[in-house]
Amino acid sequence: MGDMFRSEKMALCQLFIQPEAAYATVSELGEIGCVQFRDLNDAVNSFQRRYVNDVGRCDELERQMNYIESELKLDGVIMKDLIDDDLPRALSPREIGELEATLERMETEIRELAQNNINLKSNYSELTELRMVLEKTQHFFQDVMDASSNLGADETNPQGRGQLGFVAGVLNRERSFAFERMLWRISRGNVYVKRADLEEPLLDPHSGVEVYKTVFVVFYQGEQLNTRIKKICNGFRSSLYPCPGDHGEREEMLRGVKTRLEDLKLVISQTADHRRLMLSNTITNLPRWMMMVKKMKAIYHTLNMFNVDVTKKCLIGEGWVPRNDLAKVMQALADGSASVGSTVPAFMNELEPMKSPPTFNRVNKFTNGFQHLIDAYGMANYREVNPALYSCITFPFLFAVMFGDLGHGFCIFLFALWMVLDEKRLSHKRGGEIWNIFFGGRYIILLLGLFSMYTGFLYNDIFSKSLNVFGSTWRVRYNTTTVLENPTLQLDPAVASIGTYPLGVDPIWQLADNKIIFLNTLKMKMSIILGVTHMIFGVCLSVVNFMYFKKYALIFLEFVPQILFLILLFGYMCFMMFYKWVKYSPKTDYLPDSPGCAPSVLIYFINMMLFSSSPQLEGCDEYMFDAQPQLERIFVVLAVICIPWILVGKPLYIMIMRKLKAKRQHAGISSLGKGEIEAGGQEEGEHDEEDDEPMSEIWIHQAIHMIEYILSTISHTASYLRLWALSLAHAELSEVLWNMVLSEALTLGGYGAAVALFFIFGAWVLLTIAIMILMEGLSAFLHTLRLHWVEFMSKFYYGAGYAFMPFSFKLLLRSDEDD
């Protein structure tokens, strides 16, 4: 957790590697995954780089393996994913040739088998269609024989003036109606068409899609119609088959076709067995080969970022490395050189960076989810305070304030606990995008459930019911008759209350008619107090940034007026809430301190800003304490002073520092040489971006910053009221769901009530999960995310950096799986 306070320190390193050891060295660096290489060949075309031919070889290998994988999927064979602990290393250059020869041979054999299979299935499909034509056309000819005794012997030309010719074939069923209409038009009604739909679909040998077809026979007379009909059949992509006109000849041809179909079916079966045997030999090796080729391709892409020195005896690369991993990089360089027996070892130099380094936060499986939530808003600047560390607690707590229910929180906790305890098995499960989001945030969900159970215990709310854990501190001191006959009976807290409930809300409030009024007041004030505390903490975190980047002047010029403005106004309002809770009591004999004289804190705050007062009830004090009006005026005046303080403080400081710097440079020109000036200028520290910014832009930016902070302080404080609003809405929805669904079933009697209760309880559970847990939980999650991104992080977080993206095989393969 210590690494999460801010991003790790980075070093810009220059690597010098011998060409013969470059492949092995980059492979070692990819295994450890802690170097983000910089492209030193930006001006070079992608096709003119050193290793472009090797990348092309990898592309060809990937194409061949993708083809083999597609053939496996056609046969219904699914390859198993490799275990993370058993991932193979990248191929060595000597092994690439062997793999190319193996894949070339396998691809050729599989293509030949696939083509033969298509040819065999095409022949089988044609013979099947011919069989269907011979079987279905028997009654067609019988109908025609009744109309004419002179029938042509085959489908060819009519023999004479009184003879009929015919054409038989098979056509896709959806084209049959258009086919008949076209024949009718071109023949002007001088054709006779008979057709019959096939009940079973036929398999297309090329696409593997089932197609429904129709057998047709077209009877005609005349040579001219014969030519036209065949052209139309070709245009509709129908298959024409020879069909004898004699019944005996058709029977003989049908027996021959069936014999050929049986022989062809046997050949297809043997071919499929041989194909299946060949593909089964590749199942075990293909996933490893694909993994190796991906790594090999990534290595050559990385080597294309390297420069070649003038003597062409060394490859030079640059990259960002975390300082804690410099020893690992040195060891990887040594291992890469030793693996190929290089006589000249690789070495590394550290360079002075000219730009801001990337941001790298080292996380574990628990903090990974919270870090992703922060990075989704914007990547932190280099070495900027990391809000993810504090969000591990504040995020689930603010969520629980809105989602406080012991029962609903327990359901969320159980779901997350299952994912955490069974994460090894579930990590290999392939699910949809929603499942991946839930599983990736399993530790976030676990804390959301735990904190919701805690706040639900404080609210004393479990599925809209209360728990009497410590016993109520209210006592009814009326007799039974008074209680039963008086529907508007109220309990006087001065008499009925015997103490303070130890923890949370007293369960008696669940039965009170003014429960919503009481909880409204409590949760509204609590949300303001939590919001102001959260914002004060965010402003205080800006001091940590100023201290680390040695901008000590900004502590006085920005932090002090900002924190004063926030505390003097809204911090004072929170103090008034606490003071009001302590000062006014129903058991006091002093009238000004009784609950009837308790003022509204909001009215007090408005009067403080307007320097006015409100009329009070007779016998009540106007203020809570004697020095309150003078103290409020002082607070408002100081808060108003903070506004120009924020506006002019930083620009004036920059103007003064620039003038002092110009005087020092002018004095240095008259007494020092140019080389000494440059040396002195380098000793002054890092170059600040604001040094090159014109003063007019600095004034404009500071004015925008001042307006944004002052207005956002007011709007952000009001924004935290969503804690109260969503908490109240969740509690009321839960109560409505209980009263309108489950409570009615619990009042039923008889044996039928048990059956009814079973189904009603199922409906209540379904609605609870769908509405109260999923929809309300998602709503509370999004509101909590907004409170952190806008209200909290805007006080100290810039988020203008860029992420550290190391060359890592694990990250590369994980991104491919996500795609």
Image: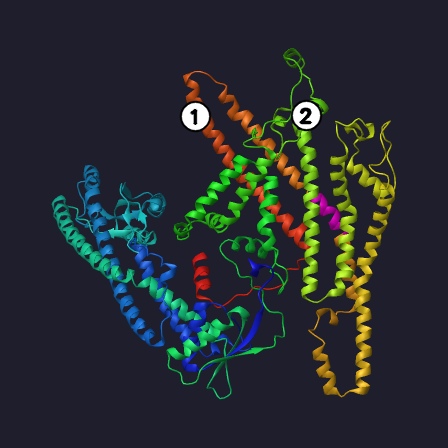
Left or right: where 77 falls relative to 14: left
Q: Residue at x 82, y 86 (%)?
A: 670
From the top left corner, tell me how far across and down residue 474 is, in percent: 65, 24
**According to the image, label 1 marks what residue?**
758
**According to the image, label 2 marks what residue?**
497
Q: Residues within 10 Å of mark 1 (few under 14, many from 20)?
A: few
Label 2 vs label 1: CA separation? 41 Å
Q: Nearer the viewer, residue 417 or 708?
A: 417
> Is residue 726 something that shows in the picture?
yes
Q: How many numbered marks are there?
A: 2
> Is residue 156 something that shows in the picture?
no
From the top left corner, tell me how far across and down residue 565 is, in percent: 78, 51
Q: Are marks 2 and 1 in contact (CB under 8 Å)?
A: no
Left or right: where 118 falls relative to 245: right
Please state which amino acid type lies under the numbered disc 2.
Answer: Ser
SS type, badge 2: loop
Q: From this view, report whether residue 239 is shown above or below residue 519.
A: below
Left or right: where 790 falls relative to 769: right
Is residue 483 highlighted in magenta?
Answer: no
Start and end of the magenta stretch? 710-719
Left or right: where 637 falls relative to 368: right
Q: Residue at x 36, y 58 (%)?
A: 83
Q: From this view, report whether residue 87 is shown above or below residue 537.
A: below
From the top left corner, tell me how far across and down residue 451 is, in percent: 56, 42
From the top left corner, tell me how far across and down residue 458 is, in percent: 60, 36
* Quadrant location of the N terminus in the rendered image: bottom right
- First along the sequence among labels 2 and 1: 2
Q: Nearer the viewer, residue 534 or 755?
A: 534
